[in-house]
Image (cartoon, helix red, strand yellow):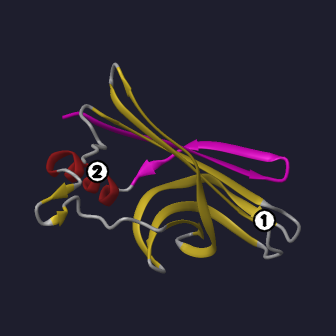
């Protein structure tokens, strides 16, 4: 069965906007593959290997050290059948308007279960370091798409 994962990240700060392709984490890719092979539910309960998240967080890092944490929200979710398969798309948005100053050169998108970072979904390494000043607002829009050859989401009575 075919599975294609792709995503983009847009970072806006001041008058600067950067748009990059991201990488999907191996753990998230494996969890999706298990979902397609085993199904989201089995007789023993949830069978895909990851817990249902109750939130999303974007970590901003500078040389692998976390400098800021941004709670994110899903602003768009679509699930449609195309000639290529089922296309599931989610857009996540988060921003930081705090007066904190920092520099970052990496982003990581995580699911949250309870109050704990649970699974890294995707990440991106920036080509240059970005600085956030005291009066700057960092706006991040993260879009992930999953194209599967079979049904990723199935509904039962």
Report the span colored magenta. Answer: 1-24
- Whether the magenta-drawn stretch holds residue 19 is answered as yes
Tag 2, which secondary structure? helix
**x then y, percent, for residue 117:** 45, 74
Please name which of the two marks, 1 or 2, marks the residue nearer to the observer: 2
Q: Is residue 132 shown left or right of residue 43?
A: right
The residues bearing labels 1 and 2 have C-alpha atoms spaced at a distance of 35 Å
- Whether the magenta-drawn stretch holds residue 63 is answered as no
| Residue 58: numbered disc | none
Q: Residues within 10 Å of mark 1 (few under 14, many from 20)?
A: some
Q: Quadrant of residue 97?
A: bottom right
Q: Quadrant of residue 71?
A: bottom right
Q: Is residue 5 above or below residue 55?
A: above
Q: Residues within 10 Å of mark 2 (few under 14, many from 20)?
A: many
Q: Is residue 68 above or below residue 152?
A: below
Q: Earlier in the sequence, mark 1 or mark 2?
A: 2
In front here: 106 or 34?
34
**x then y, percent, for residue 109:** 50, 61
Q: Is residue 36 shown left or right of residue 13?
A: left
| Residue 32: numbered disc | 2
In front here: 112 or 107?
112
Residue lying furthest front: 157
- Residue wearing tag 1: 132
Residue lying furthest right: 135
Q: Is residue 107 above or below residue 90?
A: below
Q: Quadrant of the N terminus?
A: top left
Query: Residue at left 52%, top 71%?
Result: 64
**x then y, percent, for residue 68:** 65, 73
In front here: 131 or 28?
28
Query: Residue at left 74%, top 45%?
Result: 17
Tag 1, which secondary structure? strand
């Amino acid at each position: 069965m075919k599975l294609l994962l792709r995503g983009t990240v847009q970072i806006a700060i001041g008058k600067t906007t950067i748009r990059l392709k991201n990488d999907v984490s191996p753990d998230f890719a494996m969890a999706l593959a298990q979902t397609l092979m085993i199904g989201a539910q089995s007789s023993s309960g949830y069978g895909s290997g990851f817990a249902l998240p109750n939130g999303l967080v974007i970590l901003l890092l500078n040389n692998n050290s976390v400098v800021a944490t941004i709670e994110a929200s899903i602003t768009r979710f679509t699930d449609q059948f195309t000639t290529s398969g089922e296309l599931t798309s989610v857009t996540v948005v988060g921003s930081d308007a705090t007066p904190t100053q920092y520099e970052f050169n990496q982003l990581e998108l995580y699911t949250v279960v309870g109050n704990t970072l649970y699974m890294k979904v995707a990440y991106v390494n920036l080509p240059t370091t970005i600085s956030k000043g005291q009066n700057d607002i960092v706006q991040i829009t993260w879009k992930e798409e999953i194209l599967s050859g079979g049904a990723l989401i199935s509904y039962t009575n």
